Image (cartoon, helix red, strand yellow):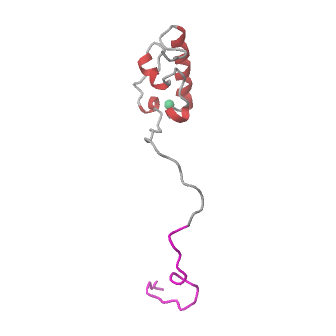
Amino acid sequence: MAMDMDEDYGQDEGYGRGKGKKGKGGGAGGDDKRSGPARRKVCRFCADKNVAIDYKDPQTLKYFITDRGKVIPRRISGNCAKHQRKVSLAIKRARMIALMPFTVTGK
Ligand SMILES: [Zn+2]
């Protein structure tokens, strides 16, 4: 049996033309509000094995705190659970030896 693409179905199923739908879907649901830079979703410590999480290395750790000294949550930093835990632990240790701030207050 050959599949003939040209076959013409004479049945009346409202196929295609007919009632013109404007656009697709219409106004169902709201707009997704996803603006801003796309963050890399890959944990940078998983991606790069050479980067060590070290409490004696505030240069690396400072990427994971906010301006005010808070730890950036994983959903934003993109770290995996394992590394986020290590980062937060390292930050806490670094704070204890005054390499990192507990908080940053204005002026
Ligand atoms: Zn990771």
Residue lying furthest front = 107
User: Residue 33 colored magenta?
Assistant: no
| Tally of numbered discs | 0
Q: Nearer the viewer, residue 4 or 27?
A: 27
Position of 10 relative to 88 (above/below)? below
Q: Nearer the viewer, residue 50 or 10?
A: 10
Q: Residue at x 47, y 88 (%)?
A: 7
The image shows residue 43 at horizontal and vertical percentages of 48, 33
Q: Residue at x 54, y 54 (%)?
A: 31
Residue lying furthest bottom = 10
Q: Residue at x 59, y 62 (%)?
A: 28
The image shows residue 30 at horizontal and vertical percentages of 58, 55
Residue 84 placement: quadrant: top right
Q: Main secondary structure of the magenta part?
A: loop
Q: Nearer the viewer, residue 13 or 22?
A: 22
Position of 18 relative to 87 (above/below)? below
Q: Residue at x 52, y 34 (%)?
A: 76
Position of 15 relative to 93 (above/below)? below
Q: Which residues are magenta?
A: 1-25
The image shows residue 99 at horizontal and vertical percentages of 47, 11
The image shows residue 96 at horizontal and vertical percentages of 54, 9
Residue lying furthest top = 97
